[in-house]
Image (cartoon, grey):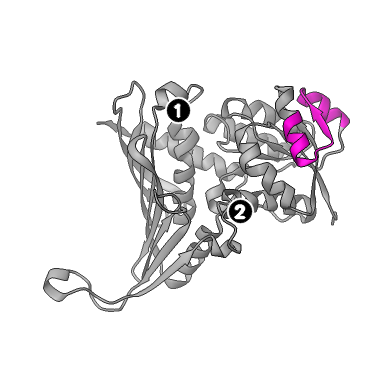
Amino acid sequence: MRKQVKVAVIGAGGIANSVHLPSLAEIKDCKIVAICDLVEEKAKRAAEKYGIPKTYVLMEEMLKKEEIDGIFCLVQPDLLYRVAYDCLSADKDIFMEKPAGLNSYQAESLARRSASLGKLIQVGMNRRYVPLVQYVFERMKKATTINQVDGCFIKHTDIASIWHYTDAFSCDIVHAADLVRYLAGAEVSDAASVIARNNSPVDNSWSCIMRFENGVTGTLRGNYQTAARIHNFEIHGAEASAYINLGFPGTKGCDATIIYASGANIYSQAAAGASVSNIEHIDGIKLCNGNDSLYSHYGYKQEDQAFIDYLKNNMKPICLIDDAAKSMRLVELLVENRINA
């Protein structure tokens, strides 16, 4: 087992600087040996801030010159496929930010390339790694048989003016679709959506329903014409229901409530009065030792640590490329089976 792994970073933009570089700087068994960006000044700024010894503009030059155990591919979505493919071809294990390409074809192509070369691709579906989500999911699996999962990811953004390289549903809302699928614990068997264009020339609202092969049903709501960013999930079973807040105005966006059934039939509050249930409140930031930095409690540091753990001792992460490809296929299926509002 390696004592310390050497990694390189490709892409010195917003997501690298806001969550991945701070996370990697805190992981003791990881050393960033080089960073690459087409804009040289961005690479140099990041290198100076995080003590990275080498900077590159050309990825190919870095791959030839540096001894690297793994690579973090943190470029924009329309560039991810080529960067990931070339890093695989250079015989490197890689972590790639979501989405897993621009469509399921690219994701499945990367999965085939990964398998043929025997190299790993971890995909940055960070919601799976949020300690709060993992805690609640484990509690729910012990408390009840899950029969329903609901996801919501809504915002206030004019996506037609800022989202140019692909649609926001497959590139952004895929976060929520992936977590619904993960929490459901099976692959989708049926899916459909009502899709709208609210004050926009492009799709910007999705109301989706799903049925999974294990009988779990699911819903997903995405909308870019709402008052604020709201991101939440519900997990239901006969013995317990969980409500996970990953984003709501006025909160830190990292808390949950689990309601455990009282055992009494609950039908009408008006007729029988309010029931009394056992309620558990969970502070997701306390689960991370009180660290309220976004990267610490929102799954980013945890997914980065998972990649380092794989490089050190071959512990496989929970979202590999073949799994992420299934989430890409899910969002495509939801759009294919559409009703226009």
Disc 2: which residue: 296
Kindly identify the residue that appears in the image at 77 percent across and 38 percent down.
92
Disc 1: which residue: 167
Q: Could one spot residue 268 in this view of the protein?
A: no
Kindly identify the residue that appears in the image at 52 percent across and 30 percent down.
103
Kindly identify the amino acid type of the residue bearing the numbered disc 2.
Ser
Q: Quadrant of residue 265?
A: bottom left
Residue 341 percent across, percent down from the top left: 24, 31
Q: Could one spot residue 325 in this view of the protein?
A: yes
Residue 336 percent across, percent down from the top left: 37, 31
Kindly identify the amino acid type of the residue bearing the numbered disc 1.
Asp
Magenta stretch: dominant secondary structure = helix
**Magenta-drawn segment:** 44-65
Q: Earlier in the sequence, mark 1 or mark 2?
A: 1
Kindly identify the residue that appears in the image at 17 percent across and 70 percent down.
269
Q: Residues within 10 Å of mark 2 (few under 14, many from 20)?
A: many
